Amino acid sequence: MPDKTILCMSSYEKGQEFLREAKRQGWHVILLTNDALKDADWPRDHIDEVFLMPDLTVRQHVINAVSYLARSNNIQCLVALDEFDIEMAASLREHLRLPGMGETTSRYFRDKLAMRLRADKKGIRVPAFCHVLNYDKLREYMSKVPAPWMLKPRSSASAIGISKLHDSEELWRTLDRLGDEQSNYVLEQFVPGEVFHVDSIVEDKKVLFSAVSKYGAPPMNVAHDGGIFTTRLLPRKTREEKDLKKINREVIKELGLVRGVTHAEFIKGREDGKLYFLEIASRVGGANIAETVEAATGLNLWAEWAKLETATKDHPYELKEPTDLYSGIIISLARQEWPDTSGYTDPEIVWRMNKRHHAGLIVAAKEPERVEELLNSYVARFYQDFHATVPLPDKPTN
C-alpha cells in the first residue's frame, strides 16, 4: 500500500495540472469522477487509479464508495478540484477524519448567504442582502433597499441561475416559480460598478501570493447578454491594487481558510467608489484565469495548490519568486467549430485556446497599458471574426 495517497474528486473536467503536480511530488494519485467523464482528457500518465460514479452529489453513496476505497488505500489527503464538490469533500473529511476544510468552513466558501452573513458580522462591506425565507423580512428589505435586486442561488457558481429583478411583483412571481427551492436563494442589492477578482495562495492562514485583476464587462453581463469575456492584471502598487489586496486578506482571515487557493470577487461601486465583497471560493478561478496568472507571474495556481496539499514537515511548501509581467485574456463563444486565430500575430500572444466553438487568447507584456490596448483592440475583432451566443443554462453542465 502506498504511504502517501491523495484522492482528488471532480464533477467537471479540470485540474489536470493539479493531478500532474501531485504525482510529481511523489504521491499516489486517485481520481474520483463521473461516469460521463470517463473519456475526458485527464493526464492518465500522472494518475494511478480512476474510479467512476454515476453521481457525486448523493452524500451517502459517495461516503460508502470512498470508505470502500479506503480499505485498500491509505488516503491522507482529499481535494475537491471543482466548486460543486467542495461540500461533499468536506463531508468526506469529517467522516474519514482527514485534515483540511470541514463542513462549517466549507459553507463560507460555497454558500453565498453564509459568506455574506459572516463577512457582514466581521465588518466587511457587502451589498445589502436578505435570505429568501421569511416573507415579512423580505417585504421589510424591499421597503428599505430600492430595486433593482439580484436574486442569486446560494450554492451555484459563475452567473448560473442569477436573475436581476426590477420590482416586488417580479420577485413574487419568480418565487412562485421556485416553490420549495426559494430558500436556496439570497436577494441582494444591485450595485453598479467595476468588478475585480483576486486570486490567492494561502498557507497557515496567511496570504502568500495574490494577483489582482479587473474584468472587462462584469461576468454576469457577459453570461446573460452574450458578450465577450476579458480580464487583465491591474498595475501593481497602485492604491486600487493595495485596497483590493487588503479587503481580500480580511475576507480570507474572517472566513477561516487555513490552506489552499482562493478566487474572490469584489465590486467598486460606481456611485460611492467603495469596495464591496461579492463572493469567494476555495478553488482556482475558471475561464483560464490560472493560465492568465501564470503568463504574468510564472506561478500556475493548480500546481501551487497541489504543492500546498502535498507538503509535509520534511518537505514544506515554498513559494518561488514570481515574475513581474502583466497579462490578460479574451474569450468568446465562436460560430466556427474550431475557430482559427492565426490572423492574430502580435508577439505578446502567449496562449491560444483549443476548444470547440470557443476562441481565446492570452497576452503578456512588461507594461499593463500594452495588455489593455491589445485586449481592447481584440474585442472589436472577436465580435466580427468569431462571436456567437447561446442561452445561459439554468443549471451547470459537464
Image (spheres, helix red, strand yellow):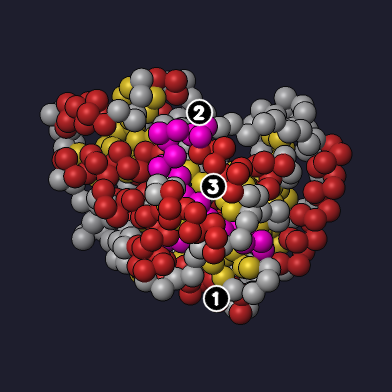
Tag in front: 3 or 2: 3
Q: Which of 390 and 177 is in front in this view?
A: 177
Image coords of residue 74 (percent x, y):
16, 37
Residue appearing at x 50%, y 28% in the figure: 398
Relative to 27, does residue 217 appear above or below in the rendering? below
CB atoms at circles 3 and 1 under 8 Å apart?
no
**Comes first in the chain, label 1 or label 2:** 1
Q: Name the residue beneath numbered marker 2.
A: 398
Front residue of 53 and 354: 53
Mark before the other along the chain sequence, 3 or 1:
3
Say what amino acid the circle numbered 3 marks: Leu
Residue 366, picture quadrant: bottom right
Q: Nearer the viewer, mark 3 or mark 1?
A: 3
Task: Report helix, strand or loop for mark 1.
Answer: helix
Asked if the residue at tag 2 contacts the one at tag 1, i.e. Cβ–Cβ closer than 8 Å, the answer is: no
The residue that mark 1 highlights is: 243
Q: Is residue 250 left or right of residue 373?
A: left
Could you say where residue 29 lies in the image, as x and y percent from the top left? 30, 36
Q: Mark 3 points at which residue?
A: 151
What residue is shown at x 49% (from left), y 54% (from top)?
139
Q: 279 or 202, which lies in front?
A: 279
Q: Depth check: give the residue in front, 318 or 382.
A: 382
Tell me where the magenta segment starts and ends, as one range. Answer: 176-202
Q: How crowded is mark 3: few (under 14 residues within 10 Å), some or many (20 or more)?
A: many
Q: Is residue 14 magenta?
A: no
